[in-house]
Amino acid sequence: MKGKKPKPDLKAFTQDLDEYADEKKLAVHKENAEISRTSRALARELREAQEAKANLERRLGLYERLESAKLAPPEWLAPRTPAAGHHAIPSLVLGDVHRGEKIDPAQVDGVNAYSVDIADQRIRRAFEGAIIICRDYLKGVIYEGVTLLLTGDEVSGDIQQGRETNEETLADSILGWVEPVEAGINLLVKTFGRVHVLGVPGNHSRNTIKPIAKNRAADNWDTFAYRVLARDYRRSKTVTVEASSAADAQVTLYGTRYLLTHGDQFHGGSGISGALAPLLLGAHRKTRRASASGHPYDVMVMGHFHQSIFYPSKGIIVSGCVVGYNEFAYVSNFEPEPPQCALWLTTPEHGITAFAPVFVADRKAEGW
């Protein structure tokens, strides 16, 4: 007896077909998701490449503008073979004047006082002291000129509570700083014959609450004051003034390359080593940056820390300040230091060969 053919299981067949369709849908979904991820990644890479290209174009344009605007240093700064006798170029640092700031002796244990009148006196003593040291203490040297290095914070500014506590307006501070500085420059000309002035911006004189990177120098009142100096001496044959368009600037004396900066880029210094630890780290980073950009230097000169540190063997010179010990330093438990400006000689044979800080405070004359 012949058996009957089994009936096809339509239900199982339909179920298998549905499972196959689901698997195909899942595979297509995964493939679409992968394509979408790849597309997004490629779009992101394209955006990054376009941004990098635009950044390179901006940098190229900046380099071209900087190159076209680069100032030629005065001839007396160029290295040359010295004639008979001992030749040298003095460098005087004038920074952290904080003109406009008012300091009450009663709030700082009586170790300092400050006002616009005292600021004028101390600026004058800085120039007179530099001349006395070079003329009377360092005799027998032929000076081929002098450099005046302005490290910033020349005016107190309107930030960091300055507007409420300053003794005068910002405009008055700028004009009040320019006048005695020009008198000092003229005095240097009479003694040394030629003067080169180089200035960088500080942090108290900025126009923004937080420090900025773009237009750091241009949007700064120190730079404005330096440009006033440059305007007033634009026709001088004995004075050259360079207001840096960047946070740092360089000058070379007899082959010794100096980098001038304010110093607020370095942070820390509360440990037992004080400011030296962040300074050494900062000097290392700046040295690497300068070398990579093709502008290496030998010694970094700055202010900002309101203390004197002379460490040329490690490439660091920190000038003291004109304003002196203030209320911030007092509540921060910093050690008081007499108001002073750094002064040293650069010689063609040995570079930095003499260092003599110029002390600018006179309690009796200042009346406190």
Image (cartoon, rainbow, N blue to C red):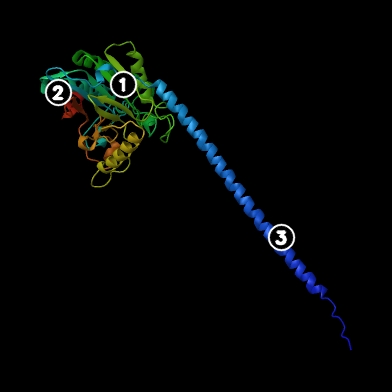
The quadrant in which the N terminus is found is: bottom right
Kindly indicate the quadrant of the structure image that contains residue 359.
top left
Of the residues tagged 3 and 2, which is closer to the observer?
A: 3
Q: Secondary structure at mark 1?
A: helix
Estimate the x, y position of residue 109 in percent, counting from the top left: 22, 37
Q: Is residue 311 visible?
A: no
Question: Which residue is identified by label 1?
Answer: 177
Viewer-side label of 3, 1: 3
Instruction: Let me know if residue 317 appears in the view.
Output: yes
Distance Cα–Cα, label 3 vs label 2: 90 Å
Report crowding for label 2: few under 14, some 14 to 19, many 20 or more residues within 10 A (C-alpha).
Answer: some
Q: Quadrant of residue 282?
A: top left
Q: Which three-letter amino acid code belongs to the residue tagged 3?
A: Lys
Q: Nearer the viewer, mark 2 or mark 1?
A: 2
Q: Amino acid at mark 2?
A: Ile
Identify the residue at horizontal 22%, vertical 40% (top origin): 335
Disc 2 target residue: 133
Q: Earlier in the sequence, mark 2 or mark 1?
A: 2
Residue beneath the point at 53% across and 41% down: 48
Residue picked out by circle 3: 25
Image x and y of residue 111, in percent:
21, 34
Pointer 3: residues within 10 angstroms few (<14), some, or many (20+)? few
